[in-house]
Image (tube, rainbow, N blue to C red):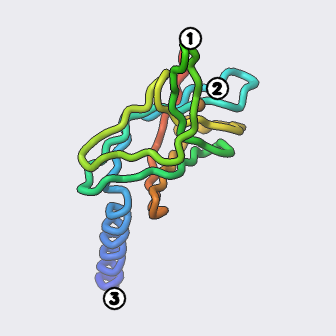
């Protein structure tokens, strides 16, 4: 009876691992961090490198960050010497490729930050609404 229970538990764990890896296997986030908001401000940005280790392109549609109301994918454009931010409604990460989100370029714009955990969870969802979770850090950037 006891070993039967143990093996059931064992297979339950294996099954959970297989299930979760099939969802998150393709995307790997490196050096992901949220810029610590300026005191009194509820907006900030997140930066990272997103690698697609899968065989298919991934089209990211939405993002969410723990402790924030909403997140948008933004890029910067330079027009006549003026730098503007523009919202992207999708971000393609080619199979085997990677996309770099960095200050002055692509970033995740974060709105409505109340209390940001030390290691906020990031959720990225693709066009099939398949979502992957990642752990970010919080960095104070001096400007
Ligand atoms: Cu922005």
Quadrant for residue 141, please give it.
top right
In the rendered structure, the answer to whether residue 91 lies left or right of residue 72 reads: left
Q: Residue furthest right?
A: 40
| Front residue of 100 and 17 | 100
Quadrant of the rendered structure where residue 36 is?
top right
Q: CA distance from mark 1 to mark 3?
A: 63 Å
Quarter assignment of residue 80: top right
Q: Position of residue 59 (x, y in %)?
A: 41, 52
**Count of number-bearing discs:** 3
Under circle 1, the secondary element is loop
- Rate crowding at label 2 as few (under 14), some (14 to 19) or many (20 or more) other CA atoms within 10 Å: some
Question: Is residue 64 depicted above or below 55 in this figure?
Answer: above
Q: Which mark is residue 143?
A: 1
Kindly identify which residue carries mark 3.
Answer: 1
- Image-based side of 130 in relation to 73, left or right: left
Where is ligand 1, by quadrant?
top right
Asked whether residue 31 appears in the rendered view, the answer is: no
Report the Cα–Cα distance between label 3 and label 2. 55 Å
Residue displayed at 31% across by 85% down = 4
Where is residue 132? Give x, y as percent: 44, 54
> Label 2 belongs to which residue?
37
Residue name at image x 44 percent, y 45 percent: 91
Question: x and y percent of residue 77 in the render?
Answer: 51, 25
């Amino acid at each position: 009876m006891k070993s039967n229970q143990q093996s059931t538990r064992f297979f339950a764990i294996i099954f959970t691992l297989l299930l979760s890896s099939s969802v998150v296997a393709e995307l790997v986030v490196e050096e992901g961090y949220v810029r610590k908001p300026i005191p009194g401000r509820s907006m900030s940005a997140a930066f990272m490198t997103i690698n697609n280790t899968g065989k298919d392109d991934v089209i990211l549609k939405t993002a969410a960050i723990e402790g924030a109301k909403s997140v948008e994918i933004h890029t910067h454009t330079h027009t006549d010497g003026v730098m503007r931010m523009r919202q992207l409604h999708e971000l393609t990460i080619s199979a085997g490729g990677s996309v770099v989100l960095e200050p002055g370029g692509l970033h995740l714009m974060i709105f409505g930050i109340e209390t940001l955990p030390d290691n906020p969870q990031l959720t990225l969802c693709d066009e099939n609404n398949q979502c992957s979770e990642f752990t970010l850090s919080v960095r104070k950037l001096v400007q």
